[in-house]
Image (spheres, rainbow, N blue to C red):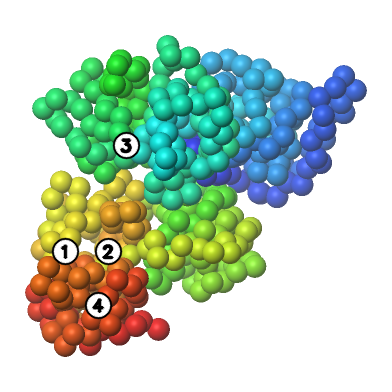
Amino acid sequence: MTKLINQNRLSIISLATISALLSGCGSSSKSEEPVQNTLTLPSLLVGEVSAISSNSITVNQHQIATNNADIEVDDNHALISDLKVGMMVEVETNGKEATQIDYDPSFKGPISINEQGATIAGFKLNNLNTENLSNGSLVELSGYNNSHSEFTVTYQQPLSNSAELELEGFITDLNTASYTFKLGDLTVQYQQADIDGALENNQFVEVEGRLEGNLLMAQEVDAEHNFTADDDLDTALFGTITFINNDASLVTLNNQWQVSITDQTKFEDTTRATLTIGDTIEVDAIWQQANNWFLAHEIDLEKSHSSPNLSSNFSVSGFANYSNGNIIINGISLKITNRTVFEDGLTADTLSGEWLELEGLIDGQSYIVSEIERDNSNEPLELKGIVTVTESQQASLFGYISEDNSLASFTEQYVDLECQWVQDNIVRACKLDD
């Protein structure tokens, strides 16, 4: 079900030298010239197909000869003519030409369409052509995530009612007694399924199965979703920044891959301080299995986001309790997923009773934790989020209230504050963090 890399999330290139300047792709014809590869190609490319000819494919600005490649489309033997522009593919090379090309859809399943737009498995669909589609239509989609709950479509086609479905998303409403969970508004029945990993609420899973009435009868459920590459693998990542932590030491690309930034990381056309949510970047990095992240050597800005949604990030510190995939601070639930980075040797089993700093994404009314690390209650609290009003008409941020009323001036605003912790859920001296 899962290839070496999940091509639905972002482009990954396993590097030999990562520099390859290739000529543009010509049209398909009998007189078409052979592709001349004079420089070494990366050994693995994953990304969107931007051009196809009878003897080449262009992915991530690399034109790759395909004459001797084995091609698979959805695990079936295929021809170069079966590949389409917009498909997210995985291309293995021998340095000169493609040896293997694989395409697996991001989704094969029913879409929901209403006045708010179209969704699939809980993801809002951007760039979907809804002509000739209706609520419940079966479609095949390829593309990438640009936020925790949004998916940008780069390729689509209709499906027959008898198609085997492939869906992915975050588990909600897990019921181990009835062997069901939900992906968005679709109920999955997994009693007869082969399951890899542990099923928990908030966990990201990939599911294969068949639709029977309103149920997806799962045959396979993959809850591990691990990057299965060799440690210290030299890679290049292409993606959109969906999260940046407070000191810009960790960013998330396409809501999937965590990238660690150090003082040794080099920057081109950007700086560590000016990285912004929504920026498209290229990262030269090595994979670190122990940390489950990529260690960045160089970051190049490919496209700057003109109007980033800076209010999509949150930060909170406090005494924590853990329960069923959620961290509770002052009665506020924050969701852990299998993409959350645990720092300082922490695990889900060691969170309760710790004073922690949590950072992550605000997704509607939900807080999705991207990073967890130990913190010190003697240090100023860094609180980033929306100040609300309690039933007793007190201003509150993540369940904290201010004894000196210093939160009151920020009511109903998204703010980045420093506060002094007093005790329990009481703070004072809250001010904007410069």
Comparing marks 1 and 2, which lies closer to the viewer?
1
Left or right for 413, reference 117: left
Label 2 or label 3, whichever comes before in sequence order: 3
Residue 196 visible in image? no
As shown in the figure, which amino acid type bears the numbered disc 1? Ile
Residue at the disc numbered 4 = 381
Mark earlier in primary sequence (3, 1):
3
Considering only order in the chain, which callout, 4 or 3, is on the residue closer to the N terminus?
Answer: 3
Q: Amino acid at mark 2?
A: Leu
Quarter of the picture holding the C terminus: bottom left
Which residue is label 2 attached to?
358
Instruction: Using the image as rendered, state which of residue 337 and residue 65 is in the foreground.
Output: 337
Residue 73 placement (x, y as % from top left): 56, 21
17 relative to 420, above or below = above
- Residue density around tag 4, few if under 14, some if 14–19, many if 20 or more, within 10 Å: many
| Of pointers 1 and 4, the one earlier in the residue sequence | 1
Element type at mark 1: strand
> Circle 2: is it few (<14), some (14-19), or many (20+) Cα within 10 Å?
many
Q: Nearer the viewer, mark 3 or mark 4?
A: 3
| Mark seen at residue 329 | 1
When the figure is inspected, residue 279 is found, relative to residue 143, above or below; the finding is: below
Q: Amino acid at mark 3?
A: Gly
- Residue drawn at (71%, 41%) of the image: 62
Taking the image as drawn, is residue 42 in sight?
A: yes
